Amino acid sequence: MKLLHKDIEKDNAGQVTLMPEEAEDMWHTYNLLQVGDSLRASTIRKVQTESSTGSVGSSRVRTTLTVCVETIDFDSQACQLRVKGTNIEENQYVKMGAYHTIELELNRKFTLAKKIWDSVVLDRIEQACDPAQKADVAAVVMQEGLANVVLVTPAMTLLRAKVEVTIPRKRRGSCTQHDKALERFYEAVMQAILRHVNFDVVKCVLVASPGFVKDQFISYLFREAVRQDCKILLENRPKFMLVHSSSGHKYSLKEILSDPTVTSRLSDTKAAGEVKALEDFYKMLQHEPDRAFYGLAHVEKANEAMAIDILLISDELFRHQDVAIRSRYVRLVDSVRDNGGNIRIFSSLHVSGERKYSVYLVCGLQQFFIVNSRIIDILAKDELIGCAG
């Protein structure tokens, strides 16, 4: 993401102009947008024209519109973002108040105006525009006949390819069909890696499976790379790392990132840091359960006592349509930061955030934890959810 212009007043009102440069920037933009904001961007509009003879025709024209945001639709797999709203500026093709849907495009700038730019949104812009933030981890989670090729970016866990091949069982006296099917499977996984993994950016490719599937695949991969003289694989061989997993399904990625050997290799990546933070919580829950509590009221009381060392919170909370609830969490984040605490915002599209934990606090005195988003309505009533230990 490139920041082209920033104009924010002392009352925190203002606008910024940004240009998305890669697919993940659409996820950051989705987190920046809120209902009621003003979005100005280039878009395509179908217009009807009437000739001097009275015949009516239609054509598609590119124009620049400013809409008041009403609906935000994000496709996480395609990384496409569509924003629907009413036109609020004069335009020769679109009447005032008419509805239009803008699909934001890569390498086309847009201007976003808000009545209040809070600290969480400004931090998101800083994170999105940081050139050091890249999709630096790829993973192949596999078992016989099933493989998932995944990219782990600083903000998202993206499934880029799913390979499924039926593998016949070995028969007494003949393994031919089994071996041929395995070769087809390994070839398909190899092609998926070449198609979806950018080795100029990726620091590490994790290959995980139960049993010896990963070892057999790596042997096949580099044997074929030598035979086909595939230089991109041969040059990047040191980036491949074999890890054990309990299955070939995507959810095993969390287990893989928790492996100490993987954590040390990926110590500078955001995904590994988030998974480690959750593992630290689980260890605390196991060894010192009296220090783990549930309830939003407890969290805020801990903050009042300046007892919070690290705050982990899901970005999903900052997309809440209720301004009062969203502001409550923003105030919590600001207060923890002012008191010297550290903030970690979990991405709800990350493997660490898929279970949608809302708030997790590591405190100097106590630890507090709010369970998943299904009970946010209960939490809003300040009811005690329960106590562990």
Image (tube, rainbow, N blue to C red):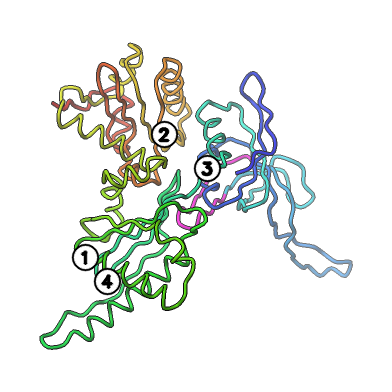
Q: Are marks 1 and 4 in contact (CB under 8 Å)?
A: no
> Mark 2 sits on what residue?
345
Figure check: 314 above or below 217? above
Q: Earlier in the sequence, mark 2 or mark 3?
A: 3
Which is nearer the eye, 215 or 340? 215
Q: Amino acid at mark 1?
A: Phe
Q: Amino acid at mark 3?
A: His
| Mark linked to residue 145 | 4
Is residue 221 left or right of 295 when viewed as pictured? right
- Image quarter for residue 163? bottom left
Q: Looking at the image, which is closer to me, 176 or 312?
A: 176
Q: Which residue is mark 3?
A: 28
* Image coordinates for residue 294, horizontal then vertical, percent: 24, 26
Q: Are marks 1 and 2 in contact (CB under 8 Å)?
A: no
Badge 3 element: helix
Question: How far apart in space, not on screen, are marks 1 and 2 (Cα)?
Answer: 37 Å
Q: Earlier in the sequence, mark 3 or mark 4?
A: 3
Who's the residue at 38% across and 46% down the image? 350
Element type where label 2 sits in the image: strand
Give, as a three-letter code, the residue at label 4.
Gly
The residue range painted magenta reads 68-82
Q: How many marks?
A: 4
